Each structure stands twice: as C-alpha cells, then as structure tokens.
Image (cartoon, rainbow, N blue to C red):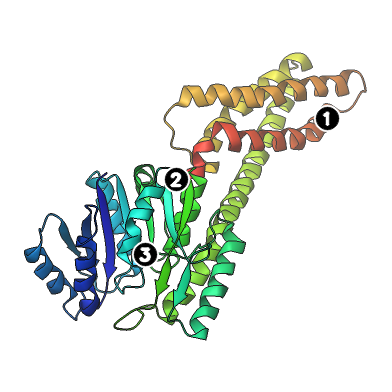
C-alpha cells in the first residue's frame, strides 16, 4: 500500500525535523508531504535539509505562497496531492508531536474495515497528556457542539490525526468546504459520511505540543463555530429556496393552465374532455424546462431520460387531477376553474417531492 503522510506546518521549524526522523524510523514505508504556509521561521528550509538526508522523493515539500492559510486548507491541498499522485492512503497529522507517528500503522490497518480511520481521544485506551483545564474545557465544548449538530458516527469528531483510504481520497474533489481552519475536519467527515464512507477509530495517547504555541487564534475559533452551524443550515436554506422557486413556477404554470383552459373552452368552444388534457400538456412541458434550468439547476445532460421521468411523475398527478376535474365538473356541477384551483396545490406537493428525490436528484451534490 502506497501511503502519504500529510503534515501542515506554520512556524514549526523546531518540531518538523525530529518528527520526520520518527516517521522514517517506522517499520513500514511511507512518503511524507509537508505543506508549509511560507513559515517565516524557516520551516521549509528544515524540510529541505531532511530531503538531502533521506530522499527527496520520499520527503516532499509543498510551499504555499500566501502565508498562513489555515490547517484545514493545507490538509485539503495535501489530500488532493495524494489523490493526484495515486496514493492508496493518506494520513494527516500535526507537526507539533501531539500525534505520534507510532500510531500510523494502526491507522493504515484499520482501512481494511473502513474508508476513514481516526486516532481517537475518546475511546477506551486513549489518553490526553499535558493539557491545562481550559484546553479540556474548550475541547469538550467543541466536541459536543459538533456531535450535536452533525451527528457523525465517530466519538472524536475533532481529531486531526486520521487516515483516508483510496475510496475516500477519490471523493476529495467533490467536497465543498467553507473556511480554512479547524472546521474543515468535521466538514470533511460530514460530507464523506453522507457520501457513504465508513469510519473506524483507534485509541491513541495525545500529548500537548513540545515546542512553540498553538496556531489557532480567536478568528479561527469564531469561523469554525459559524462554519459548523452552516453545514446543517445550508441544506435547509437550499431546500427552502428550491421550494419557493417550485411554488413560483407552479403559480406561473397554474396561470398558464387556467388561461389556456379558459381560451379553449370560452373562445374555441372545445369540449372539456379535450380542453383539460391539452391545456395541461402545454403547461407540463413548460414546467419541465423551468424546473430543470431554474428551480433545481440540474446540469444533467440526459434530457430525454429526465423528461420521461418528469412525465411519469407529472403524469400520475395529471391523470388523477384531470380525472377528478372532469368528475367534479360533470358529476357534481362544480365550476371548471374552481375544480382546477382545488386540484393544483395537492398535485404540486406530490410533484415537488418526487422531482427532488428522483428526477433532479443530482442537485444534492450542491448541498
């Protein structure tokens, strides 16, 4: 198995060299990619020294020119690198020695039963060393905040020491990540979980950093708090917007249907049995294009297949609606326009549900 260890860095010169040495001493062969945000302390130079000591093909360096851009975005760049270079697995870990390389073989072994393995601080056998009470409090609050909102199938939802298998790596380009910091970890877990990826946890001993100070500031904490909330609220917003557009489209097509029906009956003196299906068919075709292009913004190019599905969905409500309209008009003497006004809202609810779940289901990739 070709595995790549991704290490995001910013001002980690004192830590990166001994960490690379520890990784190279492992009994298994792994490559290392350091993603450095142009650290002013010379972290990249320390990595280059290790490239000379070992092998620059095994120790790789990616320097991002914009400066401190966040741990999360650095890991995304590293995972994308692993996918592009056809690695079978990629491990992300911190450079501050809080994540010991000795757990890398355990993480890789767990990929035999899962797509993503997580080094967990919250399973039996795990331990946290060196944290003061406020760090425990912050971690506890962040942990439960994320678990309550995202409902992920793992106990340590904020651990940044994890391993992605090949199936998970293939999905990296599909992920839509907001923010650059801590929130990237639970965002990735949430989206991978909803893409069908499976998770497993291994216990490990977390030790506070050896040198330097944490790079997480108040801005990153605030951004993370908002980003986690937006993960769940964004789908709700999208669905609400779609439903509004669908209702507006329904109003337009309802007016079209009623207007055509009135023209056919009042001006052209068509029998109700002909006027109702003809007006409905014209409105139906118009509804397909408006819903596809505007309501659901579906980019699927298989127009014919979607149109057939669309006809099947609308056809079921159309046949029922037309039949009930004719029954109300001919058997109960209900005014034909009033009969249609009664039927249209009921049919619209049925249609929206099936359009979202079946016909234009590709829109879920935007959520």
Q: Quadrant of residue 171?
A: top left
Estimate the x, y position of residue 73 in percent, counting from the top left. 34, 63
Q: Residue at x 72, y 31 (%)?
A: 258
Q: Is residue 185 above or below residue 341?
A: below
Instruction: Tell me if I can see residue 362 in this picture.
Output: yes
Position of 256 compared to 83: left or right? right
Give the number of callouts.
Answer: 3
Q: Is residue 178 visible?
A: no
The quadrant of the image that shows the N terminus is: top left
Residue under numbered circle 1: 339
User: Where 344 falls versus 132 (above or below)?
Assistant: above
Return the residue nearer the eye: 37 or 365.
Answer: 37
Left or right of 188? Residue 145 is: right
Identify whether 241 is placed above or below 274.
below
How far apart in space, not on screen, are marks 3 and 2 (Cα)?
22 Å
Task: Please identify the quarter of the rendering in which residue 319 is found.
Answer: top right
Of the two numbered discs 3 and 2 in the rendering, the one whose residue sits closer to the viewer: 2
The one nearer the camera, 291 or 56, is 56
Q: Find disc 3 in the rendering and name its residue.
A: 72
**Residue furthest to the right:** 332
Which residue is tagged 2? 114
Contact flag, marks 2 and 1 (Cβ < 8 Å): no
Could you tell me which secondary element the residue under label 2 belongs to?
loop
């Amino acid at each position: 198995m070709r595995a790549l260890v991704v290490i995001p860095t910013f001002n980690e010169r004192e830590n990166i060299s001994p960490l690379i040495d520890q990784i190279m001493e492992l009994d298994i062969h792994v490559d290392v990619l350091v993603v450095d945000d142009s650290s002013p302390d010379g972290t990249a130079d320390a990595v280059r020294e290790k490239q000379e000591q070992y092998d620059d093909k095994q120790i790789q360096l990616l320097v991002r020119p914009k400066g401190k851009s966040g741990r999360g975005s650095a890991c995304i760049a590293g995972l994308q690198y692993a996918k592009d270079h056809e690695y079978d697995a990629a491990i992300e870990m911190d450079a501050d020695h809080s994540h010991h390389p000795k757990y890398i073989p355990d993480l890789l072994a767990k990929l035999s039963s899962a797509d993503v393995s997580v080094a967990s601080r919250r399973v039996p056998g795990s331990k946290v060393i060196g944290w003061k009470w406020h760090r425990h409090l912050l971690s506890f609050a962040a942990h439960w905040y994320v678990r309550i909102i995202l409902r992920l199938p793992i106990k340590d939802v904020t651990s940044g020491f994890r391993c992605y298998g090949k199936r998970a790596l293939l999905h990296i380009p599909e992920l839509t990540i907001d923010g650059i910091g801590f929130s990237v970890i639970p965002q990735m877990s949430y989206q991978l979980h909803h893409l069908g990826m499976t998770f497993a946890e291994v216990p490990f001993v977390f030790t506070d950093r050896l040198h330097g100070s944490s790079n997480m500031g108040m801005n990153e904490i605030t951004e993370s708090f908002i980003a986690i909330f937006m993960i769940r609220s964004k789908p709700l917003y999208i669905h609400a917007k779609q439903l509004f557009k669908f209702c507006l489209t329904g109003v337009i097509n309802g007016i079209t249907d009623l207007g055509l029906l009135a023209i056919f009956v009042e001006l052209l003196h068509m029998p109700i049995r002909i006027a109702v299906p003809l007006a409905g068919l014209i409105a139906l075709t118009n509804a397909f294009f408006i819903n596809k292009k505007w309501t659901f913004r579906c980019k699927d190019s298989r127009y014919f297949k979607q149109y057939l599905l669309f006809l099947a969905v609308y056809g079921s409500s159309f046949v029922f609606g037309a039949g009930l309209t004719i029954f109300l008009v001919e058997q109960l003497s209900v005014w034909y326009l009033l009969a249609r006004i009664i039927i249209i809202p009921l049919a619209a609810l049925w249609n929206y549900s099936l359009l979202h779940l079946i016909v234009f289901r590709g829109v879920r990739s935007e959520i």
